[in-house]
Image (tube, helix red, strand yellow):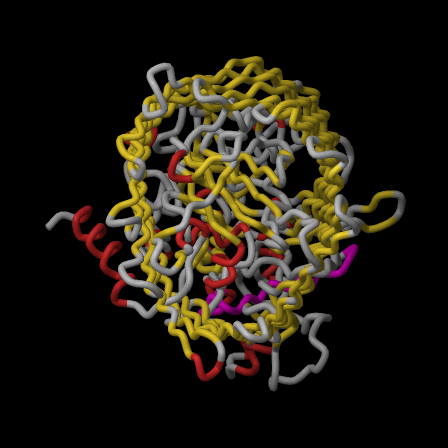
Amino acid sequence: MNKLNRLTMVTMAAPAALCAASAWAQENTASGSGIEDIVVTATRQATNLQDTPVAITAVTSEALEERGLTNIGDLTSVVPNAQFRKTQGAFGPGVSASIRGVGQADTSLAVEPAVAFYLDDVYYPLLLGSNFDLLEIDRIEVLRGPQGTLFGRNSLAGAVNIVSRQPSTAETSGQVQVTIGNYDRRELRAGINLPLGQNVAVSLSALSKKRTGYQRMLDFTCEMKRRGTPALAGSLPYSNLLNVKSTDDCTIGHMGGEDVQAYRGSLLWKASDDLTITLSADYIRDQSENAADTIVSILGNVATPNTISAANYFGIAYDSRFVTGSPYTTYATYNDPIGAGTVIPGNTYYNGFKVNGTSVRGGSRFEPFTDLTNWGVSGKVSWDITPDINLLTVVSHRELDSTQTYDDDGSPLNLVQRLGTNTESYWTVEARLSGKSELIDWVVGAFYFKADGRQKGLFISPASAFQRTINSTFDPTSKAVFANGTIRPFGEKLGFTGGLRYSDDKKVVNFVNLVDTTPNPASDTVFFIVPSQKRIDWKAGINYQATRDILLYASAASGNSLPSFNSRPLQKTQIYQLDGNEDIAYELGAKLDLFDRRVRLNVAAFYTDFKNRPTTISGSEALLDSAGNPLAGNRTLVPLPGGPPGSTTCGAVLPTNTGIQCTGRTYPRNQPATVRGFEAEYTIAPVDGLLINGSVGWSKLEAADIDARAVNKRQNNPFWTANGGIQYTIPVGQIDGTITPRLDWTYESSQVVGGTSTVFNSLMPARSVFNSRISYENSKYDFSVALGVTNLFNKVYYYNVFDSQALGAAYTEAQPAPPRQWYLTVAKKF
């Protein structure tokens, strides 16, 4: 039996071996009536999910709650061929998003995402701050494949459409939900809907959640004494973060915790039977701990001369002693143990350099923290011009301010530290005129987006002998017009879809990245650039309603992401611009409700052709001095395997100062590629109360640059993704309610860490993760109690591995996923 057949059988059978729970949007059942419908707006008009010829996963807030999923980063557990993960600490508080093998993990304002986010019809342009907490959500729609016609910019891989619960004039209602759990989890969610007469209603909601991180920061000197190996600490002092200088507890802090407050309010006014106005505002303050991060490998023999001399200052070496041995601990301190003004002979960073009489090298102290404020206001006007024609106008303003620190090297020494601040303020305006008739459903519209962004930072790298300050601005503008329609000239069963979008985008960039000392023509990177493009995206398709419960469709669509450039050049040799992505995706699909709507099966097969696929490969080059000459070090350069002509990476280790000093860099290239794959989503309700659901996806990206690799001839995303769940709702009349146990399973196949080395692939093997939940719903008093466990079998795995050694550094770091965690939730509706 081949691998595909084995995985498909496991995917379909595994949920039935589990033990039950409650489902998601398209999976709710009414007694005796089969699986219910769900209305989506993926075509910018309200349609039944099963009548919409697009690959969509639609998930309600109830379904997210039942699975223990609380933010966008958890969508990996329910969407086939998709990865949504909290970003690695250096990139700040955000989410990396990938669909069908195409995505982006960098939250810099300089790069462009591949997945477009929309929040209540408002475009959200960033990965930074996109790990939205799901407050008063009605549903989330994840559209797979390019959505350039209706969702526009940066929807190359797909789009995420988040729809909030709207105010209602029907009745006063509300809910209060309290959750506690291990790691001192405390969470409160509350919301209320208040009619203010027959035509006005307001809804208010709030969220507060706190949890201590699952990773402990350890004082290295304290820990070495606790382990009985004090000599390994040499003369390294205790961290100033250690309150009690004893070996009873060497913990100086935590990483991976949460501290979030969020508020949302909406006002609905039915000005007339045909006119509805909705005003909304939301505010998020995220002061969570930095993402958990641990060092998994150190190659002491490739450490830079500066690193060697800094370690020798304390009578130690920079080597594997700084690998803690557990993914849930780190020796990061965010402090420099070498005081300001210290001079270490032979060290080109700790050289006593001063600016205006003040020492600027050594003694830096950062607090490990993240602080993000994200707020927005919007106004929406919906006018039913006729019963079949609607005009919708949306105007929104949003601002984001984020500051975070990061300790790259995860040790008590200071090799690399970062302090970054990002601000973005933007306006969006969109107008859509839509109509429906027996012959044609159509939408025409216009879109405008303007933003002002600033990226500031301090990059301290004693290992490479420099400090850099960043103060750059990014001001993008986008204008577009679009039209989309489905015509049925031969009756209601057969439809033809066509769409066009013309867009005009540009981004005005003033980039400033300076060294802290005297001006350095070789490494000061200051430039002005305006990446821009004008293009037409299109969609064409055909769909056939074979029966009331079977839809067949075929489509082709284009997508794009905007041009970008290297966001982190360390010297002028690293300045380059990347073209925009451009693809055409072909898709065949079917949506079936079978056996009296007791079985729902949605399947799709796709082939994506990348005409433009700008990408980068990690390598290294010589670090230059102010005259543009290589700095002395202990490395050589060799050609980069699989890299473009002239690219290099670090080679053999030489005696100190007999070679050059390596610094990491990326090399650009544009390689066409193809992605092919399939997806299947299923829901089975064989009897009332029993529900089985899940999905499976497979995708493979093929490109000349990947085929040319000596190793790791595949993309970094997993080939296979799958998930499954089962629940059984048990009526218990004696307690006026129901008891529902549920078990969920999520699977990802193995992943490669990078394109040039197999050293760390063992950290990303295939993995299965299980979550469980049992809930009691009381129908008489309208309250519920739920006990849940995430990562039920305490699986140790990593969200990602950042191979800094491939960039010439001595260390490699990884982001561990949380261990097993439990929670208890009590909720009351009124």
Along the line of sight, which residue is nearer the eye, 546 or 199?
Answer: 199
Q: Position of residue 226 (x, y in %)?
A: 55, 83
Quarter of the picture holding the C terminus: bottom right
Please give left or right for residue 252 compared with residue 784 in the image: right
Residue drawn at the location 32% of the way across and 70% of the way down: 19
Q: Quadrant of residue 341?
A: bottom right
- 528 vs 830: above or below: above
Read off the magenta span.
323-341
Q: Position of residue 596 (x, y in %)?
A: 27, 49
Along the line of sight, which residue is nearer the eye, 151 or 26?
Answer: 26
Identify the residue at the far left of this view: 1
Q: Position of residue 595 (x, y in %)?
A: 24, 49
Along the line of sight, which residue is nearer the eye, 771 or 362?
Answer: 771
Residue drawn at the location 82% of the way across and 51% of the way down: 359
Residue drawn at the location 53% of the way across and 69% of the way down: 329
Residue 495 showing in the rendered view: yes
Magenta residues, dominant SS class: loop
Can residue 331 be found in the magenta stretch? yes
Can residue 332 be found in the magenta stretch? yes
Q: Position of residue 598 (x, y in %)?
A: 29, 53
Along the line of sight, which residue is nearer the eye, 691 or 567?
Answer: 691
Count the labels in the image.
0
Please give left or right for residue 763 compared with residue 655 in the image: left
Residue 702 showing in the rendered view: no
Residue drawn at the location 39% of the way across and 72% of the way down: 741
